[in-house]
Image (cartoon, rainbow, N blue to C red):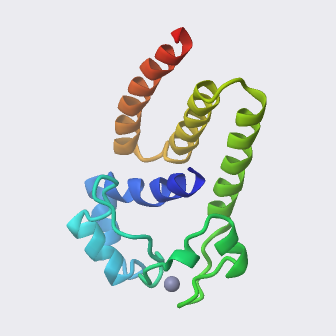
Amino acid sequence: MGSFVNVCLARLPLQYADEKRRSRLLTSPETPPFLKKHIRDQSLSLSKPARSFCFSCGHQLRWFENIPVLSYLLSSGRCRKCNAAIGIKSIWTETIHGLVYLVFGWFLNGWILPLAISINFSFLWILGNCWNCQQLRKVLSFAGAILLSLNLGVYFY
Ligand SMILES: [Zn+2]
């Protein structure tokens, strides 16, 4: 889940970038060409996901570069191809998620309640990290409403 949340944090703000941010990214010399292509083609959609890749050089990650926490530690937090830093935020997200899911799973009864609470945690994590992206905030609010009704379902279960 931590890994999935990282994918959301990296891609959703690009997928739901408003016109201004999109054109800024597309004209900026700092944005690598392959990423511009992704933004233009809108190929970072979560419903039709591209395989995991380095956001600096576009290198497609092999399975052993895609293991949560472990791969980060083994490659010292850098892309194996271009040596760009992956960023401490991604391993932080993965570690905290691992711990939170573990703690809830350990201390709460059954599996439905801990799973529901953990998913809420993940959702809030994404919402908090994407709060500045206005368009995405709207989409997330809608997803939050669905999640809330699922919560009520679990509560009355
Ligand atoms: Zn790279």
* Location of residue 126 in the rendering, given as x and y in whole percent from the top left corner: 52, 44
Q: Residue at x 50, y 54 (%)?
A: 4
Residue 114, compared with residue 95, is above or below; it is above
Q: Quadrant of residue 39?
A: bottom left
Residue 68, compared with residue 114, is above or below; it is below
Residue 84, compared with residue 111, is above or below; it is below
7 vs 73, left or right, is left
Judging depth in this view, the residue of 21 and 51 nearest the camera is 51
Hey, which residue is sitting farthest front in the picture? 110
56 vs 108, left or right, is left
Q: Residue at x 50, y 20 (%)?
A: 151
Q: Quadrant of residue 114?
A: top right
| Residue 76 appears in the picture as rendered | no
Judging depth in this view, the residue of 3 and 29 nearest the camera is 3
* Location of residue 92 in the rendering, given as x and y in whole percent from the top left corner: 69, 58
* Location of residue 61 in the rendering, given as x and y in whole percent from the top left corner: 48, 78
Residue 79, compared with residue 51, is above or below; it is below
Q: How many marks?
A: 0
Hey, which residue is sitting farthest top in the picture? 156
| Residue 107 appears in the picture as rendered | yes
Judging depth in this view, the residue of 47 and 86 nearest the camera is 47
Q: Residue at x 78, y 29 (%)?
A: 107
* Location of residue 33 in the rendering, given as x and y in whole percent from the top left corner: 32, 83
116 vs 44, left or right, is right
